[in-house]
């Protein structure tokens, strides 16, 4: 029995709001007053339509995304994503920290692939400072970055299956991810937010524990990934649900400024590692896998292919690793000349970029972070209408957004 | 007065409990004996006069009671088996290998707040879990567990099963509607659509079987399947069995058809707003459903309580009276002898084990041995014991299959679910019925 008696004309959504009539649960409660034309249109329901609020506390919105869905039966007619539940003002925080400290603010943005969040600002700052990074440091960056990419993709595949109702793959891929994360912990000292890349190099050289774990894992990596994914790739239910779901064509994807696997799944072989080469990627041999379908299955399978390419890159890194220092000689207090620099890396989710402006002090004047998750989440509005409620989560998962990066 | 309160205060808590409980127990015992002596004759006469009613009442109570351990066992099985499939340990803290965890879950659910959301319809909201739970428990009434072990032998047993089994969807709809929550409503409507669609192939898949068996009484069907396992209906109705199993999985809302409580889509479906024991009833009903569906599959297609081969007729000539004084000696000599026999290897195996420890171990082992012997004698000599064991063994094999499916498969989508029911299962069931009918006509 409920203990509080409901006021007759009080909104069930927001107790501060009093309404002129008693709204039932199936009538929309718009934000008061509607701020834009679009909002007014969205909150006007046609016959048989219903609004449903998904998130920010929903079991599978990958964090704290809130989506208001307009449903006709189970079919999604329209949707209104609401962002900002995890906003921490990272860009502003970076402006009040010196260049070294800024890196640990960007670290937890996309928390499942933290190394790439360090890589882009570090590269931008190095451009500002005109630092030559030692080649061994570059190789270590590529090596650890690719490992982190595999860890991130492994988690993606598990989530994907979990959002479709499969219980087992998430735990199998967590085993995969745990092994990688453990070896990165041996290298960097942290399991999740590594804070490993420094301006001018990396924090520490390769150590014995990392190398032995890596060698152990590399000897069975391909086989293990194939084994794990056999549960999904040959599963009729999984493939049937994913095929033709959330299709996006090349033109729309480009218009939406998508990048990374989500763009490559529509057939555009755009990869920052090849398009705008950085670090030692020009010296490494790897393919850019593409797929032409542009649906959820393509995005999923493309990430599998990427994992194989990453293993190839790691293998080459280990063979070509030069000797030498891992850190350039730099003063402790960095005061770059006034100017601006832009650096982009190919993260597991796409192009992760930083645009830094220096005014000659020891703090960045402005730091803009371009996060692929945020960009990709826009495409949800194009993909979802027309699909069923059950598929909204699958589509969202196939774009692989991380809310830490979206809300910054 | 002070003397009494002083001595009372000096007692420890267990002492107080025992001091209160013992006289009460004594009084109760005396009362019971007096009641039996005074009223026993009348009660026995009354029971004898209404034997059918008494039998039904006892069966109904027993069935209501066995659902609880059944649900606990299946919940534990599910936790442990899925954990092993997920390459994790699963429950391993409470009880041996975590086996008491489901009981603790049950207690936890009992202790939680029983909450009704604002705006919900309290009457419907309260009764929905009852309807769901009772619908699944009532279907247990017709399932033959062993020869002579069934709630009621109805000659329309199968029809009764489908009729009552279909009631559970009413409870789910009630829950979905009364919760004042859109997720609940979606879950309730999904379950209505799903159960109504799958009821049709489910029922049609056994029509061929009914033609073949010539009866709808489940007991009669089980007896038809006695003898070698080749006489099981699975070998005459393979397609029917397959359709039945798939449709039954959908009826029981199990993965891959667990759309009604798809946690990644509609939170917990119809159970979103439920907490405490009301949620517990839904939870129980789900696992009892798994048991029922497995039991019915076994009953219809896998011989029920029949052994897969004709069991050798062994009659043990056990007449304790003929042993005379030997019986007394046997009871005196055998247990100590067995204890010593089992204790000897324990004592010999290591110097660090003391004599009394070895004897204790021997005592335990001797008891286990005797229990095994008694169990074996019962299994061979008493028909319903072996029948019950075969039935439960087969049923839990199917429960395992359901758990395995849950650990392996993702969920299907609503439209795919409907497509599958109407475009594949229904035609296949009709085909099965047609072929069976033609075969019966041709053979006879």
Image (cartoon, grey):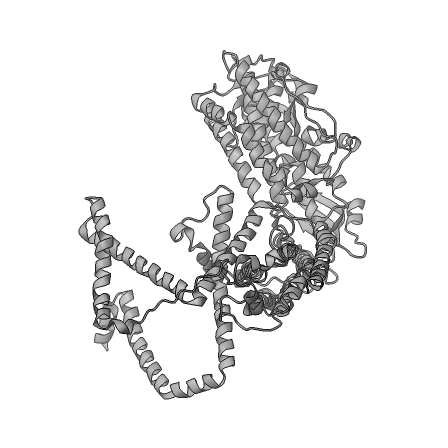
Q: Is residue A339 above or below residue B71?
A: above
Q: Position of residue A128 (x, y in %)?
A: 62, 16
Q: Which residue is painted at 45% across and 21% down in the image?
A: A207
Q: Quadrant of residue A155?
A: top right
Q: Is residue B359 above or below residue A109?
A: below
Percent across and percent down for residue A50 are 74, 54
Front-most of residues A259 and B308: B308
In the image, B54 versus B182, the foreground residue is B54
Residue B178 visible? The answer is no
Q: Tell me where residue B340 appears, x and y as whole percent.
A: 21, 55
Q: Residue at x 22, y 69 (%)?
A: B326
Is residue A116 visible in the rendered structure shown here? yes
Residues A314 and A112: in front is: A314
**Can you say which quadrant of the picture contains the N terminus of chain B?**
bottom left
Q: Nearer the viewer, residue A339 or A246?
A: A246
Percent from the top left, x then y, of residue B292? 56, 62
B296 relative position to B324: left or right? right
Q: Residue B142, relative to residue A282: is it above or below?
A: below
Q: How many marks?
A: 0
Question: Residue B358 vs residue B182: left or right?
Answer: left
Vertical side of A90 occupied by A381: above or below: below
Q: Is residue B154 left or right of residue A39?
A: left
Q: Quadrant of the C terminus of chain B?
A: bottom right
């Amino acid at each position: 029995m409920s203990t509080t008696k409901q006021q007759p004309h009080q909104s069930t959504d927001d107790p501060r709001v009093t309404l002129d009539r008693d709204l039932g649960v199936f009538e929309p409660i718009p934000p008061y007053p509607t701020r834009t034309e679009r909002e007014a249109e969205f909150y006007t329901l046609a016959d048989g339509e219903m609004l449903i609020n998904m998130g920010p506390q929903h079991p599978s919105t990958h964090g704290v995304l809130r989506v208001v869905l307009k449903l006709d039966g189970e079919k999604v007619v329209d949707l209104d994503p609401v962002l900002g539940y995890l906003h921490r003002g990272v860009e502003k925080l970076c402006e009040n920290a010196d260049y070294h400290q800024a890196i640990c603010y960007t670290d937890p943005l996309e928390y499942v692939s933290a190394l790439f969040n360090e890589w882009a600002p570090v590269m931008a700052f190095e451009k500002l400072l005109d630092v030559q990074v030692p080649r061994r440091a570059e190789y270590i960056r590529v090596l650890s970055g690719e490992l982190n990419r595999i860890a991130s993709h492994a988690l993606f595949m598990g989530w994907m299956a979990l959002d479709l109702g499969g219980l087992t793959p998430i735990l199998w891929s967590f085993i995969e991810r745990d092994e990688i994360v453990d070896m990165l912990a041996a290298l960097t000292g942290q399991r999740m937010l590594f804070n490993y890349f420094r301006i001018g190099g990396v924090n520490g050289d390769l150590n014995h524990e990392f190398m032995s774990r890596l060698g152990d894992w590399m000897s069975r990596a391909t086989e293990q990934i194939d084994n794990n994914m056999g549960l999904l790739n040959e599963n009729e239910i999984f493939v049937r649900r994913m095929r033709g779901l959330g299709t996006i064509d090349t033109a729309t994807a480009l218009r939406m400024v998508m990048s990374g696997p989500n763009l490559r799944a529509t057939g555009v072989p755009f990869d920052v590692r090849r398009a705008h080469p950085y670090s030692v990627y020009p010296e490494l041999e790897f393919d850019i896998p593409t797929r032409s379908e542009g649906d959820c299955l393509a995005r999923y399978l493309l990430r599998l292919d990427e994992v194989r390419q990453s293993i190839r890159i790691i293998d080459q890194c280990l063979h070509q690793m030069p000797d030498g220092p891992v850190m350039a000689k730099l003063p402790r207090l960095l005061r770059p000349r006034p100017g601006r620099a832009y650096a982009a890396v190919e993260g597991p989710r796409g192009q992760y970029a930083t645009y830094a402006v220096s005014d000659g002090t020891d703090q960045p004047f402005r730091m803009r972070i371009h996060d692929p998750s945020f960009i990709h989440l826009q495409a949800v509005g194009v993909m979802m209408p027309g699909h069923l409620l059950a598929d909204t989560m699958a589509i969202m998962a196939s774009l692989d957004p991380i809310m830490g990066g979206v809300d910054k | 007065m002070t003397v009494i309160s002083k001595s009372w205060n000096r007692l420890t808590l267990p002492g107080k409990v025992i001091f209160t409980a013992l006289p009460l127990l004594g009084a109760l015992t005396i009362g019971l004996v007096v009641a039996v002596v005074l009223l026993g004759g009348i009660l026995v006469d009354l029971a004898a006069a209404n034997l059918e009613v008494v039998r039904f009442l006892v069966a109904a109570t027993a069935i209501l009671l066995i659902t609880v351990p059944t649900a606990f066992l299946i919940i534990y099985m599910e936790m442990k088996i899925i954990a092993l499939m997920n390459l994790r340990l699963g429950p391993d803290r409470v009880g041996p290998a975590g086996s008491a965890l489901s009981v603790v879950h049950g207690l936890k659910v009992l202790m939680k707040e029983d909450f009704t959301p604002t705006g919900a319809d309290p009457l419907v909201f309260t009764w929905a879990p009852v309807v769901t739970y009772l619908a699944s428990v009532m279907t247990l009434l017709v399932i033959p567990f062993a020869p002579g072990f069934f709630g009621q032998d109805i000659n329309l047993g199968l029809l009764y099963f489908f009729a009552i089994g279909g009631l559970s969807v009413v409870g789910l709809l009630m829950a979905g509607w009364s919760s004042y929550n859109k997720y609940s409503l979606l879950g309730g409507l999904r379950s209505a659509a799903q159960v109504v669609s799958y009821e049709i192939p489910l029922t049609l898949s056994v029509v061929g079987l009914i033609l073949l068996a010539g009866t709808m009484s489940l007991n009669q069907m089980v007896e038809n399947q006695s003898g070698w396992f080749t006489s099981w209906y699975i070998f005459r109705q393979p397609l029917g069995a397959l359709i039945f199993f798939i449709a039954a999985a959908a009826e029981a809302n199990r993965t891959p058809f667990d759309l009604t409580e798809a946690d990644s889509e509609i939170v917990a479906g119809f159970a979103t707003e439920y907490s405490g024991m009301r949620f517990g009833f839904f939870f129980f009903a789900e696992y009892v459903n798994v048991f029922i569906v497995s039991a019915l599959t076994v009953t219809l297609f896998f011989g029920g309580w029949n052994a897969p081969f004709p069991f050798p007729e062994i009659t043990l000539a056990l007449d304790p009276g003929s042993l005379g004084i030997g019986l007394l000696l046997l009871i005196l000599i055998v247990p100590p002898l067995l204890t010593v026999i089992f204790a000897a290897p324990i004592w010999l195996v290591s110097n660090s084990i003391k004599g009394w420890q070895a004897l204790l171990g021997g005592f335990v082992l001797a008891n286990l041995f005797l229990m095994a012997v008694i169990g074996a004698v019962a299994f061979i000599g008493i028909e319903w014991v072996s029948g019950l064991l075969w039935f439960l063994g087969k049923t839990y094999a199917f429960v395992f299959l359901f758990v395995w499916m849950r650990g392996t498969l993702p969920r299907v989508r609503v439209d795919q679910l409907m497509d599958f029911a109407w475009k594949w299962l229904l035609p296949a069931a009709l085909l099965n019925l047609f072929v069976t009918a033609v075969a019966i006509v041709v053979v006879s």
